[in-house]
Amino acid sequence: MRRTRMAAVAALTTALTAALATGCGGGTALGGGANNDSPKELTYWATNQGSSLEADKKVLGPELKKFEQQTGIKVHLEVIPWATVLDRILAAASSGQGPDVLNLGNTWSSSLQKSNALLPFDAKNFKKIGGKDRFAPAPMAATGAAGKDPAAVPLYSLTYALYYNKQMFKEAGISRPPTTWDELVADGKKLTKDGTYGLAMEGGNPVENAHHAFVFGKQHGADFFDASGKPTFDKPANVAAVKQYIDFLANDKIAAPGNAEYAQNQSVRDFATGKAGMLLWQAARTSLQAHGMKTDEYGVAPVPFQSGGTDGRRNVDSMVAGINLGVFQNTDNVDGALKFVKFMTSTEEQRILTTKYGSISPVLEAQRSKPRDKDEAVQREVLAKSAAPLPQVPDESQFETLVGGAMKELLADAAAGKKTGTAEVQAALTKAQQQMQK
Amino acid sequence: MTTTAPHEAAGTAAAGTSPSGASPPNRPPRRSFLPDRIRRGGLPYLLLLPALALELLIHIVPMVIGIAMSFKQLTHEYIRNWGSAPWAGLDNFRIAVDFDAPVGRALLHSFAVTCGFTVLAVGLAWLFGVTAAILMQDRFRGRGLLRALFLTPYALPVYTAVITWSFLLQRDNGLVNHVLHDQLGITDSPTFWLVGDNSFWALVVTSVWRTWPFAFLMLTAALQNIPRESYEAAQLDGAGIRQQIRHITLPALRPVNQVLILVLFLWTFNDFNVPYVLFGKAAPEAADLISIHIYQASFETWNFGSGSAMSVLLLLFLLVVTAAYLLVTGRGRRGEHG
Amino acid sequence: MAEAGKSPTAPPRSFVWTRRVLLTLLTLFTATPLYVMLSSSLKPLQDVTGAFRWFPSTVTFQPYLDIWKTVPLGRYFVNSLIVAGAATACSVVIAVFAAYAVSRYRFRGKRLFTVTVLSTQMFPGILFLLPLFLIFVNIGNATGVALYGSRGGLILTYMTFTLPLSIWMLVGYFDSIPRDLDEAAQVDGCGPLGALVRVVVPAAVPGIVAVAIYSFMTAWGEVLFASVMTNDVTRTLAIGLQGYATQTEVYWNQIMAASLVVSVPVVAGFLLLQRYLVAGLTAGAVK
């Protein structure tokens, strides 16, 4: 008797599951295409660009009002904390229930492109937002795999720059910012004394680590993925690249051991409060101000290069960092969504928003004005001349997690006094590479 | 906290059998609104229906779907329409248990870390709990206050408790290093607790801090059911405190221990909140608990087939362990009662 | 404790000293983090971003004012209250019904039911997070009842999370109530439901309160499902508290102040009602 009961429950469960499962598959596929069922409303997911979620709402609110006045379309804004963005996008993609327009870290473009969650910007869609040529080439290179229609368009661009403390440089007798890593290490050693350090590193943050690994890799003439998209993490040149970064803390000792734990922007605070003389960061102005550092107290320079020969070394000193704007495949207001993309990437809006966020505009016309500060001047130059996009492969996020995570462990080892020579770096990167599935 | 007075009354309520104001006033017989047939055979099912429906909707069906996912090749391409993802057969499982390959090795490592963590955390939580419960069996001044203090960590929401620990465990500005390094001078240089190998201990300490009060609470309650006479008789026989604990207290705690340890085991083994709040999405290798590992395997890489397969293995393991545990301890119990 | 002073002779000196030492150690272990929470919440920002200090350089209540401005804590608070409150209320009612059936009736599938329900405690949350989310979306598409992103979805989820242990605790508790009582009530003309409401429930108040505390605490503290299933409007405290770690600064003093503020209701409730929890738990465990 008990068996029949169990069978009944099992049958019921199976039936329910089957109904739901087919419902999922079918429902999404049927309602999958973009349409215009709800022309008067849009939902916009913004990422956290300002100092807090509330600050972002204050920045974006008036602009969205403007858009509503121009088009009659009401935009529902949700600012999503970084910690949950990817999970929310994933949930949206898997269910078809999500925003109409959304911000995404530009490094996720390929991954989302592969999942087909975003409306591809083909010629027709580009025409609706004023053409592809309006955008600078470097940020356009970070919108998806080469040869495919971009999954999104660039919204804000950023590059890394070297921030240095003028007063500390003067006291140490350093006349100009370093242009090579050798110089940076030498300067850093001069600055490192009595509890202050040469360089502040965000060593506990895998993403930051991975970005630096990428740049150092390029400068050593290596890539973390080969042409076919296969990982090549433990190539000797990449090992040398990662080791060079780890060595700032391990060998050169120009960074405080405690930096290995920093993952909440403590390195910016250390720089702003004079505990470290240099910082590699993107658009640090607003953060530095928030910590009470005035703009004339620090200088901005491009990130250094390798010194010496140019054997296979590439002229790259920053990733193309930034935020892209995408349209969700399942939008029910595709025309409105494209209008919104056009609005957000218009020259006027770009000037307003990038000024508030301290980023630079990927829109060429908006870049023509006089730079608002040295920060923007440096970033514009880097973006135009020496920035390269991170690998546009779907597994890019795994690269950040695994290589950045391996570097975090290496930095922690170094800070705790363990050896982090070439062999250890090699082993860590090999292990990271092996974790890449298929 | 000024809430100490009521605890003194704790335990009298434990009997719970007094029908406080429950003797029903005499009312004229009333016809039930339920038809007789349902009243007799169907009523229990009717009472169970809401619970059953919820369990099916929220637990069972999602679980079955999750298990189905583990047989699918559910990656980026299929996330939008995962009904169309190709079946992978046992591939996901094969990769997960191939301990010579990196993925399997990482899973095994994570499993080992979790086992070590669980044994330590549950063991310590139980030890602290039983110690405090036994020591506080007798009344002494300030006992109520102390009990309230001990219970507080368990009552705190998980995230506030863990956030506080992450503040204490910071290398440069945390209390732990301030005491160990600056004030006591035990360590040569400040220790890293949140990155590197010591993160395992950070995890254990945080977890024990949060869960031992639960053990304390359960065991305190159980001690109240031990008749006073057994202690008195033992004392007349000349048994010391230690013998009393060994021969009276601990055997009497057995039934509660059986449940307590199982519950602590399941909670600790599956714990997601503590590592997630303490380390974020990427836990250090030494503290790579299985729940965080699986979260990464599925959410960071969007490979839900593989992540689900790992979850299913975890579930199987827990089922086997629990069944074995109940079988062994249950037999012990039955034997004991005759 | 009624049986206090149970030993006719005073405990030996060595025992008293052991007790003092061990309890002092446990007190230090337990109280230090709580003290840091409290003292840090009264510190100005520079006290918590630099080297650790035991006492505030100046005592300030500013963090308690700032927490409401840095993030919309008030809204998160209300959300958590609604979600945890509703989940608790529903869960308790449903658990009472189910436990009554299990405790008082013999029926086919009883064992299957209890074993299945209890075994859900082993389900790793990660495994059914995404499927559950998909189910909610599909129910929304099919019926127009929005579960995803709404408080309703979260309420349903949390009440189910706590059902298994709640039912189990209540079965234990109900079993300890003599059947004669509800049989007498049925003789007096109440139906079985009447007996449940008029006799069993009043006699089981401690057990029911225990279940309610447990449910409320679980719902108040859950992180994983809240992170995926809530949005701007419905975000709960568990996720909202992350807002104090902003792009420019980690406001540790505000984090501690907010932690205290969100903990006080549950801790106070728990300490006031813990004797019921003890009663409910042991009834379930000891039987």
Image: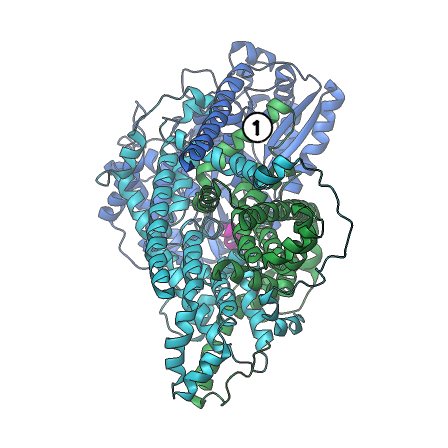
Q: Which residues are magenta?
A: A265-273
Q: Using the image, determine if residue C273 lies above or below residue B27.
A: below
- Chain C drawn in what color? green
Whole-percent x, y for residue A241 in the image? 31, 40
**Res C29 visible:** yes
Chain letter for the part of the structure drawn in blue: A
Left or right, residue A379 beside residue B85? right
Whole-percent x, y for residue A115 in the image? 45, 23
Left or right, residue A263 beside residue C239? left
Q: Secondary structure at mark 1?
A: helix
Between residue A16 and residue C18, name the one nearer to us: A16
Tell me the residue that label 1 is attached to. Answer: C137
Between residue C231 and residue A209, name the one nearer to us: C231
Left or right, residue B212 beside residue A129? left
Q: Residue at x 65, y 50 (%)?
A: C196
Is A174 magenta? The answer is no
Q: Residue at x 26, y 32 (%)?
A: A311
Q: Using the image, determine if residue B238 lies above or below residue B107.
A: below
Whole-percent x, y for residue A48 in the image? 58, 38
Q: Amino acid at mark 1?
A: Val
Whole-percent x, y for residue B336 in the image? 36, 65
On-image quarter of the N terminus of chain B: bottom right
- Chain B drawn in what color? cyan
**Res A407 visible:** no
Looking at the rendering, which quadrant does residue A316 occupy?
top left
Number of other residues with Cα within 10 Å of mark 1, as a class: few under 14, some 14 to 19, many 20 or more: many
